[in-house]
Image: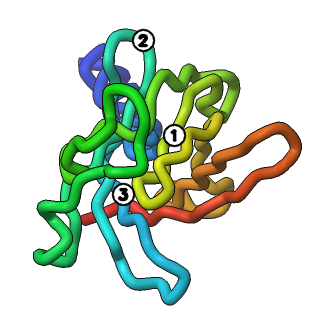
């Protein structure tokens, strides 16, 4: 009986830890706060990746990445794997890349959950000392 109680207590402590993972679906918004797309972040091997799960404007769902280079050139944006190769380092995921489908540019990338709200994800793309950090909200 005592073992069962400890097991239940242990399992209940694990649920909040899982809820604070970066894995899941996230709302990518524009400057006005309107949701442009849903990004699905997932694990592949021991690394984290992200792809465009859904573009919100129906008329934009068939767009292709004309400005992208390499394998992404002329690929559909919806379904595109735009975030690649992030590894967990402390409370952040680092060492990967992210592509901006509007410009076709690839940036080094790191992501982390907001300290105050685990339903907020910070996504930073950077080149050298220049960077931009976007805030994504967990999609329901």
* Element assignment for label 2: loop
65, above or below 138, in the image: above
User: Dividing the picture into quarters, in which one does residue 89 lie?
Assistant: top right
Tell which residue pokes out farthest to the top in this image.
45
Can the viewer see residue 110 in this picture?
A: no
Would residue 83 be found to the left or right of residue 35 on screen? right
Count the labels in the image: 3
Q: Earlier in the sequence, mark 1 or mark 2?
A: 2
Real-space Cα distance between discs 3 and 2?
Answer: 20 Å
**Quarter-wise, where is residue 133 in the image?**
bottom right
Is residue 138 something one can see in this rendering? yes
State yes or no: discs 1 and 2 in contact (Cβ < 8 Å): no
- Residue nearest the observer in this picture, 42 or 101: 101
- List the residue tagged with mark 2: 46
- The quadrant of the picture occupied by the C terminus is bottom left
Which mark, by number, is residue 26? 3
Of helix, strand and loop, which one carries label 1? strand
Q: Does 132 sit left or right of 3 as displayed?
A: right
Indicate which disc, 3 or 2, sits on the residue closer to the N terminus.
Answer: 3
Residue 101, given in percent of the width and then of the height, sits at 41, 53
Using residue 100 as the reference point, say whether residue 115 is left or right of it: right
Q: Is residue 119 left or right of residue 106?
A: left
Disc 3 crowd, CA 10 A, few/some/many (<14, 14-19, 20+) = many
The nearer-to-camera label among 3 and 1 is 1
Residue at the bottom extreme?
A: 32
Question: How is the model colour-coded?
Answer: rainbow
Residue 71: percent from left, percent from top: 32, 27
Name the residue located 39 percent from the left edge and 27 percent from the top edge. 70
Image coordinates for residue 122, horizontal then vertical, percent? 60, 54
Instruction: Give residue 23's quadrant in the image.
Output: top left
Query: Of tags 1 and 2, which is closer to the observer?
Result: 1
């Amino acid at each position: 009986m005592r073992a069962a109680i400890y097991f239940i207590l242990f399992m209940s402590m694990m649920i909040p830890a899982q809820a604070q993972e970066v894995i899941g679906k996230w709302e990518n918004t524009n400057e006005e706060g309107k949701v442009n797309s849903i990004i699905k972040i997932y694990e592949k091997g021991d690394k984290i990746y992200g792809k465009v799960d859904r573009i919100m404007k129906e008329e934009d769902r068939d767009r292709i990445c004309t400005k992208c280079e390499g394998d992404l050139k002329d690929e559909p944006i919806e379904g595109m794997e735009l975030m690649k190769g992030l590894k967990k380092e402390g409370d952040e995921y680092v060492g990967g890349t992210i592509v901006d489908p509007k410009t076709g540019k690839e940036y080094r990338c790191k992501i982390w959950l907001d300290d105050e709200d685990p339903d907020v994800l910070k996504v930073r793309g950077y080149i050298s000392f220049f960077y931009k950090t976007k805030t994504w909200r967990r999609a329901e």
